[in-house]
Image (spheres, rainbow, N blue to C red):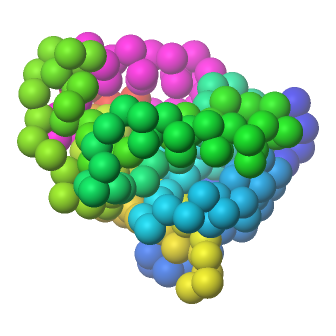
Amino acid sequence: MVNRSLDGGHAAAHATLPRQTQALAAAVRHNAVVCAVLARAPQLGLASWYLGAGAVTETVWNLQHGFQPTHAIKDYDLVYFDSGDLSVDAERAVQEHANQLLGDLGVAVDVTNQARVHLWYAERFGRPIPPYGSVEQAIATWPTTASSVGLTDGPAGFAVCAPFGLSDLFAMVVRPNKAIVSEAVYRAKADRWARLWPKLTVLPW
């Protein structure tokens, strides 16, 4: 454990979105893996991409708990949108390129084309979903409000996609986003998070 608490974390929960975005940018800079992924991902040549979910959310919570920035982050989710090629082979090629580009980081980077999620979602989670129209629309269906966050960096600079804002993230509130997730999936995720980050407030389904 290290003393790297996120100063003003709860204050940020009540700040304006621009100030929250600044606080998030400052927080993720503590995680060298996040910084490396954001810096190198443009080399994949993807038209629309974000680093999102646990890699972002858990970095913030780690700092608020005084943990190492990378503590308990299972993988780093890199999502993109390519409706022009929905094949498994195309997605696998991007994954392999990412593995080569980021392999020295020693972490699992999970690459997903959000344009083809509807093709496998029913088999994995037991219910069909319609195709997404964009990667931003996909992020808006992720299991919790606090983790429905994506970061990108490029010529236009650091940008955040946060359909539900950033208040729950900074307030350490786990709230279900019922757009497509099941109660069982939410409970499993929330239970794991509560064990790893005990200061969280987990709301019931």
Q: Position of residue 203 (x, y in %)?
A: 32, 31
Residue 175 drawn above or below residue 154: above
Nearer to the camera, 86 or 151? 86
Q: Residue at x 10, y 27 (%)?
A: 128
45 part of magenta stretch: no
The N terminus lies in which quarter of the figure? top right
**Residue 50 sits above or below residue 200 on the image:** below
In the visual, does 75 lie left or right of 78? right
| Quarter of the rendering containing residue 180 | top left
Q: Position of residue 69 (x, y in %)?
A: 77, 42
* Residue at the spot 62% in from the left edge and 31% down from the top edge: 75
Whether residue 164 is visible to the viewer of this picture, yes or no, is no
Depth order, front residue of 192/43: 43
Left or right side of 72 for 105: right
Using the image as rendered, state which of residue 84 and residue 60 is in the foreground: 84
Which percent across, then down, holds residue 137?
24, 57
User: Which residue range is magenta in the image?
Assistant: 177-201
The reply to whether residue 176 is visible in this rendering is yes
The part of the image, by quadrant, that contains residue 36 is bottom right
Q: Residue at x 42, y 34 (%)?
A: 89
Residue 5 in the image: state x and y as whole percent. 78, 49
Quadrant in which the C terminus appears: top left
Residue at image point 38% right, 45% down: 113
Residue 185 among magenta residues: yes
